[in-house]
Amino acid sequence: MTSDKIRIALLPGATFSDLMEILQKHIHFLFLREVNIGPYLYYLLKVNIETRDLIYVYNQWFDEDLVSLRQEPKVTAVEVEVEYLMDDNMYDSEVQQLWNLNGSITPSQNIPITWKRKSFTGKDQTIAFVELEYMQTNHRDLVNQVGRKGKGSIYVMSAGNDGPRFNTNTFSLRNSIYAIVVSAVNARRELPSYASVGSSIMVVAYGGHLVYILPLNLLNPVSECSKMDSGTSIASPTVSGVIALVLEARPDLSWRDVQHLIVCTANTDLKGTLVEWERNGAGFLTHPRLGFGLIDAYNMVSLAEQWMLVPKQLSCSQTYRGQVELYLISPRGTKSYILTNRPADRLQPETFTWEFKSVQSWGENPCGTFLLSFGTRSNDVTG
């Protein structure tokens, strides 16, 4: 795949004149326009096709011209912009061979049956892939949720592949109430070794396993099947696709409605490890590594078709981080694993403000006394 667009950022205080001076030395790139992402200014460049070929996206880090541009003292970031254009009529015959999508594994994510019985394909739904470093978490579109004509954009985030030694609440945006955090299970309904832990994990999808290997393919934008490694980066797009089916069925759903539907329809027939499933005060089974269970497309779409829209949100936040363990006990007795022991987390700032998120007491009456339990444990690592 190739691209003719390059986005760069300069040091604070650098000017447009500095950019022009840089481009005089890099004749293969031409200035296109300025791009504002929140308070940050970026410059969009295009490839000068009269002097060189387009950028080969998959080898961008070895492209000599890009490497040279990145080495400029006043340049802080250089990224290739890629647009994926999908053909609405595109269908890959190999989809029936994809065990993570074709329904051959039990429990099934029920995607093919949704296509067949509901005739929904996600038509006219827009899915955008955004790199985290360009995501401004306090941008008004995210905080005020003005996307989709005020109903709110749906943010789906992979939980990461760092294993139980890390916690999703310590990674930017995964602790946001607007994010649907997705982890993964393997073909045997088990947690893979890379599955993270955290009270912000809402749902899981099939993502393969590093040890128990069942060939895992993924449809890519050029209409071919590609062999992929295991990971939550495979599970997360699956959930995004399911949400597209749901929004085709009910385009009036808000971002909060979508989250409620996930919680109400996720399949808990999975094997939990480290701790057992816990039933919260509202009757939902929840797990610090599996969320509310496996995404279920058919049940989610079916419920969406008769769903009564939820009212505006109530929210709260907590502000702790460091080498501590935090557990929040709801008035109904549900335990949220806000921060678990993280031996590799060595961040020790003098002051630090952080918001945490928990979905484990979903549906409970929030009135009453919450108990915040915290303690410290040595994070010394030997070897």
Image (cartoon, helix red, strand yellow):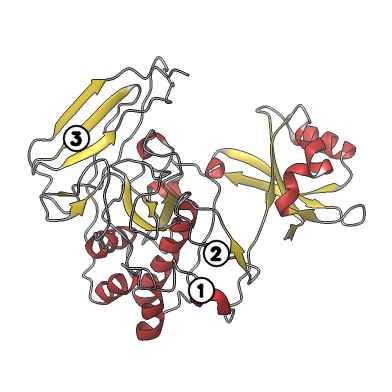
Q: Earlier in the sequence, mark 3 or mark 2?
A: 2
Q: Earlier in the sequence, mark 3 or mark 1?
A: 1
Q: Nearer the viewer, mark 3 or mark 1?
A: 1
Q: Position of residue 371 (x, y in %)?
A: 13, 32
In the picture of the structure, the residue carrying the numbered disc 1 is: 97
Q: Quadrant for the N terminus, please.
A: bottom right
In this rendering, the answer to whether 290 lies above or below 105 is: above
Q: CA distance from mark 3 to mark 1?
A: 43 Å
Quadrant in the picture for residue 254? bottom left
The residue shown at (27%, 62%) is 266
In the picture of the structure, the residue carrying the numbered disc 2 is: 217
In this rendering, the answer to whether 338 lies above or below 50 is: above
How dense is the environment of label 3, judged by Cα within 10 Å: few (below 14), some, or many (20 and up)?
many
Q: Is label 1 in a helix, a strand or a loop?
A: helix
Q: CA distance from mark 1 to mark 2?
A: 9 Å
Q: Position of residue 253 (x, y in %)?
A: 32, 67
Residue that lies at the very extreme toward the top in this rendered image? 350
Q: Position of residue 200 (x, y in %)?
A: 31, 44
Q: CA distance from mark 3 to mark 2?
A: 39 Å
Q: Position of residue 20 (x, y in %)?
A: 82, 38
Q: Amino acid at mark 2?
A: Asn
Q: Is label 2 in a helix, a strand or a loop?
A: strand
In the picture of the structure, the residue carrying the numbered disc 3 is: 328
How dense is the environment of label 1, judged by Cα within 10 Å: few (below 14), some, or many (20 and up)?
some
Q: Amino acid at mark 1?
A: Gln
Q: Earlier in the sequence, mark 1 or mark 2?
A: 1
Tell me whether circle 1 and circle 2 mark residues in contact (CB < 8 Å).
yes
Q: Is label 3 in a helix, a strand or a loop?
A: strand
Q: Amino acid at mark 3?
A: Leu
Q: Is residue 302 left or right of residue 213?
A: left
Q: Nearer the viewer, residue 336 or 259?
A: 336
